Image: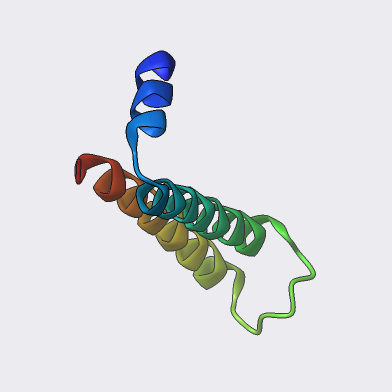
């Protein structure tokens, strides 16, 4: 699977590689933001803890949906 990914990555044009890297970067950003909202206790957000958990889970689910949609596009 990894070798197939590397072969496909090398076959892509420069624009497609750039968009792939940006897609992976935004996946990691949304995932990290969701985890930060859930786990960081002193985060300056004025939300009750239950809402913070829900918001963090929504961000994590959204990041995985973007990730799956990005790779199923091909």
* Relative image position of residue 67 (x, y in whole percent): 36, 47
Relative placement, left or right, of 13 versus 32 is left
Q: Residue at x 35, y 49 (%)?
A: 16
User: Which residue of the protein is positioned furthest toward the bottom in this rendering?
Assistant: 46
Position of 16 compared to 35: left or right?
left
The residue nearer to you, when weighing 47 against 20, is 20
Given residues 14 and 27, the one toward you in this image is 14
Q: Is residue 12 above or below residue 41?
A: above
Residue at 29%, 49% in the rendered image: 70
Residue plotted at (38% across, 54% down): 15
Of 46 and 31, which appears nearest the observer?
31
Q: Residue at x 37, y 58 (%)?
A: 62
Residue 46 appears at what percent x and percent y? 65, 84
Q: Which color scheme did the rendering employ for the protein? A: rainbow
In the depicted structure, whether residue 15 falls above or below residue 11: below
Of all residues, the one furthest to the left in this rendering is 73
Quarter of the picture containing the N terminus is top left
The quarter of the picture where residue 2 lies is top left
Q: Position of residue 45 (x, y in %)?
A: 67, 80
| Quadrant of the snapshot with the C terminus | top left
């Amino acid at each position: 699977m990894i070798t197939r990914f590397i072969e496909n990555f090398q076959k892509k044009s420069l624009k497609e590689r750039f968009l792939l890297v940006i897609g992976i970067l935004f996946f990691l950003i949304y995932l990290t933001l969701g985890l930060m909202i859930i786990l960081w206790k002193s985060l300056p957000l004025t939300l009750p803890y239950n809402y913070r958990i829900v918001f963090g889970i929504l961000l994590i689910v959204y990041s995985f949906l973007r990730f799956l949609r990005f790779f199923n596009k091909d």
